Image (cartoon, rainbow, N blue to C red):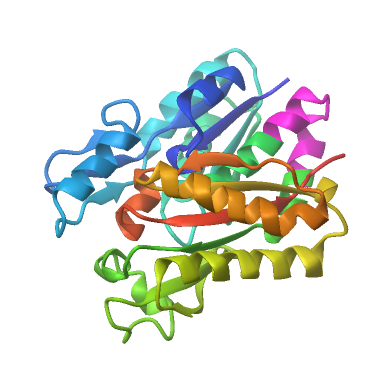
Amino acid sequence: MYQIISDGSCDLPPELTKEKNIHVVPFYVSFDDTNYYKEIEEIGVRDFYQKMVDKSGEYPKSSMPSVQDYYDAFEPYVKEQIPIICICITEKFSGSYGSASGAREMIIDKYPDAQVTVINSEVDTVLQGLFVLEACRLRDGGYSYQESVERLLAIRSSGRIFFTVGNIEYLRHGGRIGKLAGIAGSTLGIKPLITLKEGEIFSSGLARTRKSSMKKVIDLLVRYVSETFRSCSEFLLCIGYGYDYGEAVSFKKMVLDRLAGFGVKEIELFQIGATIGVHTGPYPLGVGIIRRAAD
């Protein structure tokens, strides 16, 4: 048996992380560049989005867990000789993986026999959550520590998030807009379509209305499923949303209608947390998909 640890970008509900025995090392979020609060522990996700909605035009910031944060998370398990798999947000978005790797080196120096593997998931938010849940499924299914690591690394490149946002201003303010060729010069009314793959975000087109952007996100998903998988038994799927739960429910129905032919009957809804929400604004909406690591 081994312990699964993830940074707070995994965006799994606290009740689920408790049920699955996932130790989450939170990110920090600030609305004033001075006071930083641990996500979930000191500021709830709903409260975070409410502040964004109430204070339109203000741009919060997030800060990654420190080396000490990870060291404090690792050491109790290492003392009990429990191996650790730590899953971090894509290294291209944050230094969280670097912090965890630094903590691992400190742990190994003090506890030479410790087993600590730090994985750059190359994904983020709710898709990282699926990746973490798959790690739990491997652990609870009796796969060995090393086989679980190998299987997780093998599915990593299959991860995709297809999503849209309410407007591009948060992406622009957060410095992400330069990575999205074709969006930088767009007008405020345009809704961008964005794909995350291989740890980075890419522009996948534009839409003029929110409803049109939702439909086009689903088109991107259906195309990827058609080109990559033979049946729904081969992949995991979830929907990520921000402030508007009602919109997410409507979007879920649209996705299920389009994927009925692939045998998909249910999709989890997970709320996107502050780590990514500071860059997307209060209205991100999309779908994450990744290959299953085991039957």
Chief SS of the magenta region: helix
Q: Is residue 62 left or right of residue 286?
A: left
Q: Position of residue 64 (x, y in %)?
A: 35, 45
Give whichever of 265, 19 is nearer the camera: 265
**Which quarter shows the C terminus?**
top right
Q: Is residue 169 above or below residue 25?
A: below
Q: How many marks?
A: 0
Q: Position of residue 40 (x, y in %)?
A: 35, 30
Q: Is residue 75 left or right of residue 146?
A: left
Q: In this rendering, does residue 289 appear at all?
A: no
Instruction: Find residue 25 and report its image quarter.
Output: top left
Residue lying at 51% horizontally and 74% vertically, measured from the top left: 202
Residue lying at 76% horizontally and 47% vertically, measured from the top left: 264
Stretch in magenta:
135-150
Q: Position of residue 165 (x, y in %)?
A: 39, 63
Is residue 120 located in the magenta-colored stretch of the structure? no
Instruction: Find residue 169 and report its image quarter.
Output: bottom left
Residue lying at 42% horizontally and 42% vertically, measured from the top left: 245
Q: Is residue 80 above or below residue 61?
A: above
Instruction: Find residue 187 and report its image quarter.
Output: bottom left
Give whichever of 281, 215 is nearer the camera: 215
Q: In this rendering, does residue 286 appear at all?
A: yes
